[in-house]
Image: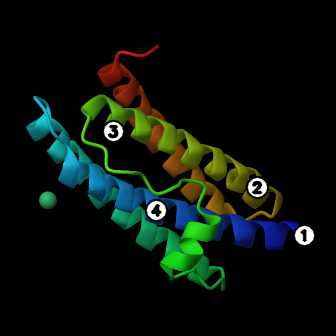
Amino acid sequence: MGNQQALKSKLNSLLATYQVHYQNLRSLHWNVKGPNFFELHLKYEELYTRTQIIIDDLAERLLTLEITPLHRFIDYLEVSKIAENPLIADGREGMSYILDAQKTLIGLEREILVLSGDLDDDGTNAMMSDLIREKEKTNWMFSAWLNKK
Ligand SMILES: [Fe+2]
């Protein structure tokens, strides 16, 4: 696979992964229970709202590159690097999922960062570094919340 083809498929895979992650976040928002309900219900909403904006920006970046974005969930589920979650009511479990999901997303974005750098695709490269930096910061916060090293 040439670099251009690899970039195209990885960008669609990133889009798919964000779409599945988005639905997982909505599920967390709906189903959370326990003493942190109000805090987490709001935090999950903040995260899925931000994710929705990222999804649209990403799909439109693909279109800018003359790549057709995947648009069906059947395709998203096939290429997503994150699986659909079962129902999660526990706050720690929900936050641990988010920390891991964001690590998976950062991994994919790093691959795209390298590829887009090789292809001199500065726009995609800058977009990936912004997305990576944003999630690195929130992962610090999620680790602090979870009291993990
Ligand atoms: Fe809501």
Verify CB contact (< 8 Å) between mark 2 and mark 1: no
State the mark number for residue 65.
none
State the mark number for residue 117.
2
Q: Residues within 10 Å of mark 3 (few under 14, many from 20)?
A: many
Q: Residues within 10 Å of mark 2 (few under 14, many from 20)?
A: some
State the mark number for residue 20.
4
Image coords of residue 76 (percent x, y)? 55, 71
Image coords of residue 121 (percent x, y)? 71, 65
Verify CB contact (< 8 Å) between mark 3 and mark 4: no
Question: Is the residue marked 2 within 8 Å of ligand 1, measured from its CB?
Answer: no
For mark 3, what is the residue?
A: 94
Query: Which residue is depicted at the point 37% across and 55% down?
Result: 24
User: What element does badge 3 sit on?
Assistant: helix
What is the spatial separation of the Cα atoms under label 2 and label 4, in whole angstroms?
27 Å
Q: Please name the amino acid that badge 1 sits on.
A: Gly
Q: Please name the amino acid that badge 4 sits on.
A: Val
Camera-near label (1 vs 4) is 4
Q: Assign ligand 1 to one image quadrant.
A: bottom left
Camera-near label (3 vs 2) is 3
